[in-house]
Image (cartoon, rainbow, N blue to C red):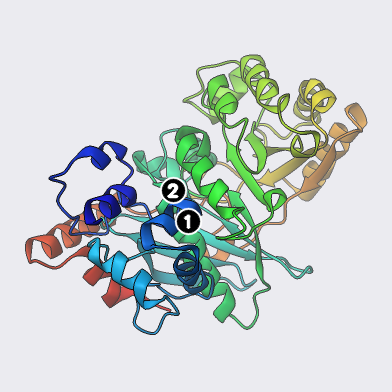
Amino acid sequence: MRALVLALLLHDTSALSTATLKPPKLATASTQTLALPFAELSELVGGTGRARSIWDAVRSGQEPLDADAPTTVGARRVLEASGLTAFVPACLEHKDEAADGTTKLLVRLADGLAVEAVLIPHAHLPRTTLCISSQVGCDQGCRFCATARMGLVRNLTPDEILAQFVIASRVAAQSTRMPPLTNIVFMGMGDAGRNAINVKLAATSLIDGEKFRMARSKITISTVGPSPDCFRELSDADGMLAWSVHAADDALRKQLVPSAKYTVDELRAGLLDALKPRPARQRTLMLAATLIAGVNDSPEDARRLAAFVSPIVDVAQKVNVDLIPVNPTDHAPDFLRPSDDALELFRDAIREVEPRVHVALRVTRGDDKTAACGQLHIQRKSLSEARAVAAAAVDAGETPRLVLRRKVDR
Ligand code: SF4
């Protein structure tokens, strides 16, 4: 039984046939808990009742292995026998609340690395959106983005993506001024298209009626479009797709996204291939453009973008164009926010050329705590320090779980 338990908890299914499998000492990035399909978890712990008790604990904001969690004795015994030390493989290290209630979370992972996630309460409506990370760092190099400075450290596992949601849900539930967390956008650190498999597994868990119970329509999976195939790979993702297009002119786009290897026409072809097989109600698309004064904010840029979008509108059920005034970062001090007049002219020019799209000017949120779009960044120095702390803990016979326990803030 124990070997089966361990095998099921690991991504590596070859472990199922490995009789000599050693129990994992740590709740490492290779451990699968939150993303484990409910049926497999039920089999693992000996019944759906036991599995439901674990998920009752997760949804109520508790760690299922904690003594006061509503996890059944049987489920707890199986999990502990597997050597598992945490069902939620990350913890909240720090939170920073901006004047408008936007709250940036520093989430520490079991290997000592960290990512940021941002809770964004709606200014007027009773809903909060979580901007979630899919990678530690990012290799897309967007010129206006602070995360780009980190480079790519590694992909997040499905569990690490979901752990951000669990932690953010706890923070939202404890806040007196934050409406319920109902929406998720994969627009934090990293590019979801570069970690499509893990992002899709996480999204499937989010809409699972036995697990997170989110609505598919409330999940937005965003990519800058590293390749046409990145779009195709996201075709069957549970959530709305979004493309951070930024400009419809290849030379201009290359200036903004230096990693771009494909033309916008090639990328659009990949996107259309991804949209066509989707059920009609899941073809809604968001196109995001970060606008920079004097760079890509002219009415001519807007008209070119609108003409470029037209073939997408023919296929998609609905297209929302989100215009994001660039937020200041040390990374690109010369990039300035367009004036309000320029933003309105840009919006109107799009509407004129392609009236079928819905165009919105995004209101900047959380910029006083560098929690706004493009501002997420963790110093590489603190990353290496974190790794050193985790390594020292392991050398000392402590597990990252112990490190996590000391820092956890519930
Ligand atoms: S904007 Fe997104 S894709 Fe571009 S560097 Fe930043 S995190 Fe990566």
Query: Could you tell me which residue is drawn at 82 percent across and 46 percent down?
Result: 341
User: Relative to residue 6, is residue 138 depicted above or below?
Assistant: above
Mark 2 surroundings: few (<14), some (14-19) or many (≥20) residues within 10 A: many
Q: Position of residue 350 (x, y in %)?
A: 84, 33
User: Relative to residue 298, is residue 176 depicted above or below?
Assistant: below
Which residue is the site of mark 1? 162
Q: Quadrant of residue 228?
A: top right
Residue 374 visible:
no
Tag 2 secondary structure: helix
Task: Report the side of 10 relative to 399 (left or right).
Answer: right
Q: Position of residue 236 (x, y in %)?
A: 62, 33
Residue 263 visible:
yes
Tag 1 secondary structure: helix
**Marks 1 and 2: CB-CB under 8 Å?**
yes
Where's the N terminus, which quadrant? bottom left
Task: Report the side of 55 relative to 240 (left or right).
Answer: left
Q: Quadrant of residue 245?
A: top right
Mark 1 surroundings: few (<14), some (14-19) or many (≥20) residues within 10 A: many
Which residue is the site of mark 2? 158
